[in-house]
């Protein structure tokens, strides 16, 4: 069932960020509470994020994971890919070079639309976005199962009318594969 009284993700994240000394960290990672991660996830994931010089990254989705885009599904025969898009969830990592431009997050409910804005900002700042295929996660529940998706899409549309963005067609591409 949908929990319409739940505090939106972005509100919670911004409350946590307000309390955290993020300037002391190289990475900030946000994650949903319904994911299954591989063993030794964090070390391997951040290793490939660093090796591939990613600024915003996510792990690939493994088979039977609830994903929104085929681009973010695991690709075999590579450890990571530079992409034009990183999804707002279920787990995303931000390198310190992005903090001043991205944090705190704009107040857009669950975060819909932020990822398309990140694609535009990455182009403006020369940041690499990427998917780490070596550390695939499984998102256990369907996307949007706990909130009103239509309401979040309206918030996203309003946000994107004001903010810079690229089209999904431009964003949903693999730019480079890392073997």
Image (spheres, grey):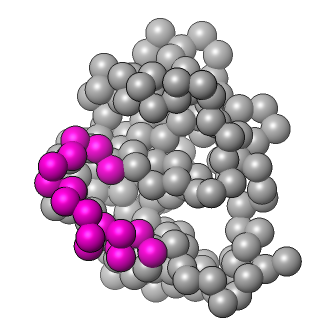
Q: Is residue 149 above or below residue 135?
A: below
Return the x and y of residue 5 as percentages of the image width and height.
Answer: 66, 90
Q: Residue furthest right?
A: 1
Return the x and y of residue 131 as percentages of the image width and height.
Answer: 49, 34
Give the residue at x 41% y 69%: 13
Q: Quadrant of residue 145?
A: bottom right
Return the x and y of residue 76 as percentages of the image width and height.
Answer: 64, 16
Give the total of numbered labels: 0
Give the residue at x 62% y 36%: 37
Range of the magenta residues?
A: 12-28
Give the residue at x 62% y 57%: 33
Give the residue at x 30% y 20%: 51
With 110 as the anchor, is 4 left or right in this view? right
Frontmost residue, 116 versus 42: 42
With 62 as the anchor, is 89 left or right in this view? left
Q: Quadrant of residue 178?
A: top left
Magenta stretch contains residue 58: no
Frontmost residue, 179 versus 4: 4
Q: Is residue 42 above or below residue 113?
A: above
**Quadrant of the drawing holding the N terminus:** bottom right
Can residue 124 be seen in the rendering of this structure?
Answer: no
Q: Main secondary structure of the magenta part?
A: helix
Magenta stretch contains residue 24: yes
With 20 as the anchor, is 133 left or right in this view? right
Can residue 76 be seen in the rendering of this structure?
Answer: yes
Return the x and y of residue 167 as percentages of the image width and height.
Answer: 48, 59
């Amino acid at each position: 069932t949908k929990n319409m009284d739940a505090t939106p993700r972005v509100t919670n994240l911004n409350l946590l960020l307000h309390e955290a000394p993020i300037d002391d960290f190289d990475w900030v990672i946000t994650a949903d509470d319904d994911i299954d991660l591989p063993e030794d996830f964090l070390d391997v994931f951040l290793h490939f994020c660093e090796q591939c010089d990613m600024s915003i990254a996510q792990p690939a989705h493994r088979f039977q994971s609830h994903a929104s885009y085929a681009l973010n599904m695991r690709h075999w025969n590579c450890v990571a890919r530079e992409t034009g898009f990183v999804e707002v969830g279920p787990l995303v990592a931000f390198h310190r070079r992005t903090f001043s431009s991205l944090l705190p997050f704009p107040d857009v409910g669950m975060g819909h639309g932020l990822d398309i804005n990140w694609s535009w900002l990455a182009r403006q700042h020369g940041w690499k976005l990427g998917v780490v295929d070596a550390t695939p996660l499984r998102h256990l529940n369907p996307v949007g199962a706990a909130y009103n998706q239509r309401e979040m899409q309206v918030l996203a549309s309003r946000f994107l009318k004001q903010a810079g963005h690229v089209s999904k067609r431009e964003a949903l591409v693999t730019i480079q594969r890392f073997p």
